[in-house]
Amino acid sequence: MNVGEALKRVTDVVRRKHLARATEECYRGWLKRYCEFVVQLPAHLPSEQKLERFLTALAREDVAASTQNQAFNAIIFFYREALGVELKNIQSLRARRPEQVRHAPSREETLRLLEAVQAGADPATSLVVRLLYGCGLRVTEPLNLRIKDVDLAGGQLIVRGAKGGKDRVVGIPAAVR
């Protein structure tokens, strides 16, 4: 199969699955780059080894882990969805994500923040900050709350359309009630 046929096949599958145009462009770009890499390899190599070598070459170029994962997913999509071939046991050198040190504010820092907001802000801002902290809400979630989402008797908030488009229920602390 030549590069043009491969690109047409992946385009047809992406459009049939109604994936985003950006996804189509991304997958086509990685597939084209993969095809250009594969022509340098011996023809007798199985597809798994070709993909392993491609991913290892990416890792040696010092690409980010997310970039390598994007390439991996695009090529796997091509094999699985466009060709109907399931690749198994891909063993390649993988780029590593840098470890991130997470910082949670101390109890004292949190109390100072809450006191500062209560002292210098209007009641609405103070309520939003206390909801963020007390209920563990994400930044935009208190702004999307409606009256029907608040159950003071049951001590619950219904957060609609949260991360991933899913609804969730969180408790309301007594201090916020």
Image (cartoon, helix red, strand yellow):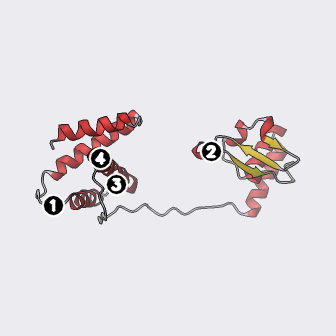
Looking at the rendered image, the disc whose residue lies closer to the viewer, 3 or 4, is 4
The kind of secondary structure element at disc 2 is loop
Q: Nearer the viewer, residue 66 or 152?
A: 152
Gap in Å between the C-alphas at discs 2 and 3? Answer: 29 Å
On screen, residue 23 above or below 113 = above
Q: Amino acid at mark 3?
A: Gln
Name the residue tied to disc 3: 68
Q: Earlier in the sequence, mark 2 or mark 3?
A: 3
Which numbered tag is attached to residue 45? 1
The answer to whether residue 122 is visible is: no
Name the residue tied to disc 4: 78
Q: Are marks 1 and 4 in contact (CB under 8 Å)?
A: no
Q: Amino acid at mark 1?
A: Leu
The kind of secondary structure element at disc 3 is helix
Which numbered tag is attached to residue 166? 2
The kind of secondary structure element at disc 1 is loop
Q: Amino acid at mark 2?
A: Lys
The kind of secondary structure element at disc 4 is helix
- Which residue does the image show at 72% across and 41% down from the upper left? 142
Gap in Å between the C-alphas at discs 1 and 2? Answer: 44 Å
Looking at the rendered image, the disc whose residue lies closer to the viewer, 2 or 3, is 2
